[in-house]
Amino acid sequence: MATVRIRNTVLGAGLPKIAVPNVGTSTEEILTAAEKIKSAKPDLMEWRIDYYAAGVNDFAKLNTTAKKLRQEVGELPILVTFRTKNEGGVCSLAEDEYLNLIEYVVTNRLGDAVDIELFHDEKRVKSLVNLAHDYNVVVIMSNHDFEKVPAKDVIEFRLRKMAQLGADVPKLACMPHSASDVLTLLAATTEMNAEISNPLITMAMGDIGKVTRVAGQVFGSSLSFGAVGKTSAPGQLSIEDLRNAEKYLAIQ
Ligand SMILES: O=C1C[C@@](O)(C(=O)O)C[C@@H](O)[C@@H]1O
């Protein structure tokens, strides 16, 4: 299994790493949340810029806030994510606007890693991945289904496709309605781990899915999202609970 390094955080080795989303809606909220997140000592902070409409609509402002954020968190790796409304985000953008925003995030190095959703214009997605690599930005490619757990071969197809497009880390989140849905996600994760060398990230959301957020080391998910204060998706545990659960389940 290959590992992926984001500053000093290594995905694909040891316990799954812990990311905490920053869902501040103003510069002040973002910086206050960052201070709290930093003191909780996660492995990575995810800056959810879809919560920051003022910045998304004003790139100069986004850039200034990114610089302040870096000052606030020091060496803590930053993943920049714009989650589109279709996939569970809070702010709508037209297709071109989304792709241009990601391009800006990459070429201005607003973070160490960027989230690029799979389901956008394939040519542009591919060129954004190449661009990110030119700028030394790690690509976490993602897909979210807030309605259901897709069939196992569909999950596998999507994760495989992300790897083929050059993603460093393929990621998929989905919503289970039964224990067998959870098993579907876990089986797909385990099988894809055997097939592709990239570290993967998967999770089933909601209460039924919580087990998938803590057992990544067993089933092959390299990172889990935990909350400091506000959550960014259903079923996220607090960072303390997540850390304890991962340690409890650790493979010695
Ligand atoms: O993709 C993900 C995973 C997530 O949706 C979760 O379920 O923990 C939380 C999001 O902030 C992140 O971008």
Image (cartoon, grey):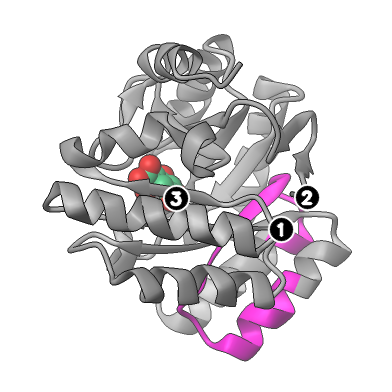
Q: Residue at x 66, y 31 (%)?
A: 68
* Image spot of residue 11 (x, y percent): 68, 39
Secondary structure, mark 1, is loop
Disc ID at residue 202: 3
Contact? badges 1 and 2 (CB < 8 Å): yes
Secondary structure, mark 2, is loop
Q: Nearer the viewer, residue 80 or 156?
A: 156
* Image spot of residue 129 (x, y percent): 72, 71
* Image spot of residue 229 (x, y percent): 33, 20
Crowding around mark 3 (Cα neighbors within 10 Å: few <14, some 14 to 19, many 20+) is: many
Residue identifier under label 2: 2
Q: Hey, which quadrant is residue 99 in on the image? A: bottom right
Marks 1/2: CA distance?
Answer: 5 Å
> What residue span does the magenta drawing correspond to?
106-129
Contact? badges 1 and 3 (CB < 8 Å): no
Instruction: Give the answer, above or below, for where 13 lies relative to 129.
Output: above
Instruction: Give the answer, above or below, for where 188 lies relative to 205.
Output: below
Marks 1/3: CA distance?
Answer: 15 Å
Q: Nearer the viewer, residue 249 or 104?
A: 249
> Does any portion of residue 21 appear in the rendered image?
no
Q: Kindly identify the amino acid type of the residue bearing the numbered disc 2.
A: Ala
Q: Residue at x 43, y 11 (%)?
A: 244
Q: Earlier in the sequence, mark 1 or mark 2?
A: 2
Residue 127 belongs to the span the image colors magenta: yes
Q: Residue at x 76, y 52 (%)?
A: 109
